[in-house]
Image: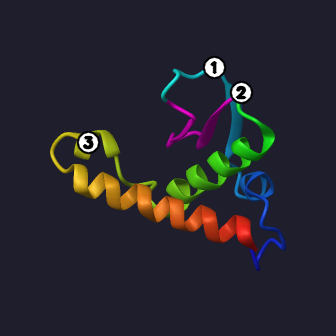
Amino acid sequence: MKKYGTNSPFELCKKLNINVLFVDLPENVDGFFLNSRSKNSILIKKDLSISEQEKVCAHELAHALLHSCINAINYEEKNPEYIAFLENEANSFSKFLLEQ
């Protein structure tokens, strides 16, 4: 926030060269971070309200910044506590970011 002068997750993604795409997603998925060698992306369910899209973007931005080297699929079944920790960390980050 200090470096880029904004707490908008959309603006931060733009500054950090992270694509934000609004797409159709399954009912139980609001968004996810996609780590790619060519360009990282955040996919957000297009049917969400603007405020929900902002929350999802902030949450997924946390994964991009804090967890980009972690393939959560590898841990999902073997270590659900670790996944819960990552999700809690992303929730805390997004809450802090949006309250500024």
Mark-to-mark CA distance, 1 and 2: 6 Å
Range of the magenta residues? 29-45
Q: Residue under label 3, please give it.
A: 76
Q: Amino acid at mark 1?
A: Asp
Let me know if residue 39 appears in the view.
no
Residue at the location (61% across, 40% down)? 41
State whether residue 47 is above or below residue 93.
above
* Callout 3–callout 2 Cβ contact below 8 Å: no
Q: Which residue is mark 1?
A: 24
On the image, numbered disc 2 is attached to which residue?
A: 46
Q: Nearer the viewer, residue 9 or 19?
A: 9
The residue most toward the bottom is 2
Image spot of residue 43 (x, y percent)? 62, 34
Work out how far the residue at label 3 is from the one at label 2, CA to CA, in angstroms: 25 Å
How far, Cα to Cα, is label 1 from label 3? 23 Å
The residue nearer to you, when weighing 65 against 24, is 24
Q: Please tell me whether mark 1 sits on a helix, a strand or a loop.
A: loop
**Left or right position of 24 against 5:** left
**Which tag, 1 or 3, sits closer to the chain's start?**
1
Query: Is residue 37 highlighted in magenta?
Result: yes
Comes first in the chain, label 1 or label 2? 1
Amino acid type, mark 3: Glu
Instruction: Give the quarter of the image for residue 81.
Output: bottom left
Q: Is residue 79 visible?
A: yes
Label 1 close to label 3 by CB (< 8 Å): no
Given the image, on which type of amino acid does mark 2 rest? Lys
Provide residue 58's location: percent of width, then percent of height: 65, 55
Which comes before the other along the chain, label 3 or label 2?
A: 2
- Measuring 50% from the left and 60% from the top, which residue is drawn there? 90
Q: Is residue 23 magenta?
A: no
